[in-house]
Amino acid sequence: MITLNYRKILSTLILTGILFYPGKFVVHAENTYLAAVESSLRKAADWQIKNFKYARTGNLHDYGIDAWTNATLYIGMLEWAKIANDSTYYDWLLDIGNTNKWKLPNNFLNYPKYQFYHADELCIGQFYLSMFSIYNRKEMLYHSKERADWIINNPPDSIMNISNKQSWTWCDALFMAPPLYAHLAKIENDHRYIQFMDKEFKRTYNFLYDMENNLFFRDNSYINKKELNGRKIFWGRGNGWVAAGLVNILKALPEDSDYRQFYEKLFKVFIPRLTELQSSNGFWHASLLNPENYPSPETSATALITYALAYGINNGLLEKEIYAPAMEKSWNALLSIMDADGKIGWVQPIGADPKKVTENMTAPYGVGAFLLAGSEIYVYYNNF
């Protein structure tokens, strides 16, 4: 395992610079600090590209080229590509989009109507829209806009029960779908998208947000369930999805948007609450209120929350003096579970609730979350 403490590295380099090369070496130390972040992201990205595969038959909802699992990787990979400024990563992402013809999932025989609404199926649209913002190619936008328009023009079933996948009835959905609508509103300068997003997000918030704990239930089937320690069940990655989803919504919302107040207010309550639940070793666990029964680190939850922490600090939503230590601790924790080849372990497999995690478990969405976290960490240290 690789454990890097960037602050310790930086402090050592600065001290060395003061003793031997006053003034000049400090600048080099800061560059070295950023280089260390960049190196970690490159290793993780390269390992995942080398080991990337997707299903062509079977369960394409979870394992197809356009599945939410892989879409999360593409979203994170694109943020890394912007930092790396290396055509290798852009070319890989372009190949993904071109291979899939920039379409959203439509993988099922006699494709059931509800799947057109399914939030998971919209996740890859976030990647397409971000690529459109770079390349301005109409095919990158067309299918995502077509799907979003269809949903708005054919309002989903509004029953808030996990069996209804037309509405956003599970907390993960707040990462998968809302940022697509927020980004479309920005690209098209069309208020309909943000109105729809806001209405649907708030329905999920009112349904699944627990005011007592300032956390989200994964879905309504968990509202009355308890952990072995008697506490409510709050899934680590589920809440991580919401945290990262809030970031991606805020990135797309204009600063003067009338909608920002609600999302910023929620961010300023929710992310500090998650910070309170960070373990002493920097990780978050599969179960937020029962870490003693799930003592293993959980990478995907930790990375998604770290992404939100760093974004909040970088954009003045969280006080640096208060929250930077938690952010640095979680980033160092994430680095500690990357092996020498760049593999990211301790990623809980696909699921809906806390489960046991082992060191060898990895998944594209975990790597995507790691790259998202690292992209904001890079911004933080670039302003150090």
Image (cartoon, rainbow, N blue to C red):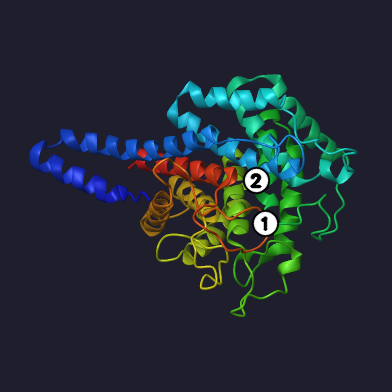
* Percent position of residue 29, x then y: 23, 38
**Residue at image mark 2:** 258
Q: Toward the viewer: 365 or 363?
A: 363
> In the figure, residue 229 lies in which quadrant?
bottom right
Q: Toward the viewer: 67 or 215?
A: 67
> Which residue occupies 65% across, 53% down?
350
> In the figure, residue 269 lies in which quadrant?
bottom right
* Percent position of residue 371, x then y: 49, 41
Say whether residue 335 is visible: yes
Furthest toward the left, the residue is 20
Classify residue 48 as left or right of residue 61.
left
- Determine whether the residue tagged by mark 1 lies in a helix, strand or loop: loop
* Percent position of residue 260, x then y: 61, 47
Classify residue 91 as left or right of residue 59.
left
3D distance between C-alphas at marks 2 and 1 = 35 Å
Specify few, some or many for label 2: CA neighbours under 10 Å numbering under 14, 14-19, or 20 or more. Answer: few
> Which residue occupies 50% across, 48% down?
307
Q: Amino acid at mark 1?
A: Gly
Sequence order check: which comes first, mark 2 or mark 1?
Answer: 2
> Which residue occupies 66% across, 42% down?
179
Classify residue 154 as left or right of residue 340.
right
Q: Toward the viewer: 300 or 212?
A: 300
Q: Mark number for residue 351? A: 1
Q: Quadrant of the C terminus?
A: top left
Q: Amino acid at mark 2?
A: Asp
- Determine whether the residue tagged by mark 2 lies in a helix, strand or loop: loop
